[in-house]
Image (spheres, coloured by chain):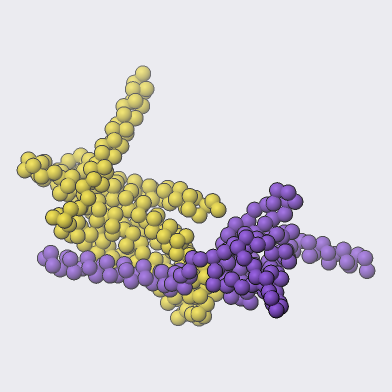
Chain colours: A yellow, B purple
Amino acid sequence: MNYLQSIGYNTLNALTGFGRALLMLVGAIIAVPQRKNIRLTVHQIYVVGVQSLLIIMVSGLFIGMVMALQGYTILVNYGAEGSLGPMVALSLLRELGPVVTALLFAGRAGSALTAEIGLMKATEQLSSLEMMAVDPLRRIIAPRFWAGVIAMPMLALIFSAIGILGGHLVGVDWLGVDAGSYWSIMQATVEWDKDVVNGIIKSFVFAVVVTWIAIFKGYDAIPTSEGISQATTQTVVYSSLAVLGLDFVLTALMFGIN
Amino acid sequence: MTTRKTELLVGIFVVLTLAAGLLLALNVANQGMSGSDQSYTLYAKFDNIGGLKPRSAVKVGGVTVGRVESIYLDQDDFTPVVVLSISEQYNNFPDTSSVAILTSGLLGEQYIGFQPGFAFDDPVVLTDGDFISDTKSALVLEDLIGQFLFSRDSN
């Protein structure tokens, strides 16, 4: 009997948690940045976007370089090293760009968002805002949500572009693949609406999910130091799992069915 | 951190994104080249299409003039019909033209090789919805090996 009760308790807990998360998401989406508080959003884009730029660009460069190196050693056996360009470009645009950016973003910016909002809650700054008749959803949550949603697709685009240039660096400048074939076969293979736009859509979906999880975990954290540390860990774990799981679903929908 | 500096850095971020998007659009996806969406449709009936897929290229002497729009099976005689979407800019192919399914390289993808026919004094050009009657099917390796073995036996 106790066992059954605990199942029911946990189910109800999970459902109410999801309900609160959904309500918060709706609130954040409705509170689109207005003209008067666009400054707050711009500042958050600086915090989550510009400050993530370095790690995104360095990872993009090295992932592109490693892929060119690995791809070359296999493709050269078949005399197909000209296909290095499309291999690097397609894997970056379709998969690695959006996914790796989302994972890095969850670790770099998502955990920071959770910790920041969680500490605001623990030190009762959110309650003080409400006391002053300032809606924390509008003042704190919405700018961070929109900044994340705007910044992550931009970071993913930069990641892919830098990765392709890194592939060029290793493939063409170092290993001696013909520069003309690197670009021209890439141009013949990659399609704007199929590959690039689908990658941007993927990255947009990841942005909504990762930022949502990060903000909600902070907003819903137990207001103690232990609670905040738990919430931060959960943000990284849940967003990584959500990104990897959603990536399969999105890939199946976009590229799986002809 | 002053607001001014923040806004400047966000501005640089946006410009970087635009540069990345431009690189992807012009250099990677080559969006600028295929400006004209105007196209007309031709049909071709093959015995066997091999590994041809929708979006495969249609080439005249190596120049891409269109794409394979779709492939379906004719329910009456059970032969595959390939729908070709040809750019409107190339609209004066004579109706004696032929199409063949070719492979680029040994392991490459299959595409449609479009061979324009001879144009006499008053050529009838292919227009939207026409069927191309002269077609050559894809080369199937197993059939080829079978023919080879068969011809060796008879010798």
Residue sticking out furthest to the top: A1
Question: In percent of the image, x 35 and y 62: which residue is there?
Answer: A156
Question: In percent of the image, x 67 and y 71: which residue is there?
Answer: B124
Asked where in the image residue A230 lies, by quadrant, the reply is: top left
Question: In percent of the image, x 29 and y 46: which residue is there?
Answer: A213
Residue B9 visible in the displayed image:
yes
Task: Return the x and y of residue A145 as percentages of the image width and height.
Answer: 25, 51
Q: Is residue A155 left or right of residue A68?
A: left
Residue sticking out furthest to the left: A132
Q: Is residue A35 left or right of residue A192?
A: left
- Residue closer to the observer: A112 or B59: B59
Judge whether A125 appears above or below A74 on screen. Answer: above
Asked where in the image residue A132 lies, by quadrant, the reply is: top left
Task: Return the x and y of residue B89 as percentages of the image width and height.
Answer: 54, 72
Q: Is residue B78 left or right of residue A210?
A: right
Residue sticking out furthest to the front: B122
Question: In percent of the image, x 41 and y 69: which residue is there?
Answer: B25
- Quadrant location of the N terminus of chain A in the rendered image: top left
Q: Is residue A59 left or right of residue A52?
A: right
Judge whether A147 appears above or below A76 on screen. Answer: above
Count the numbered circles shown. 0
Task: Return the x and y of residue A236 as percentages of the image width and height.
Answer: 31, 50
Task: Return the x and y of residue A144 as percentages of the image width and height.
Answer: 22, 52
Residue A80 visible in the displayed image:
no
Judge whether A30 appears above or below A6 on screen. Answer: below
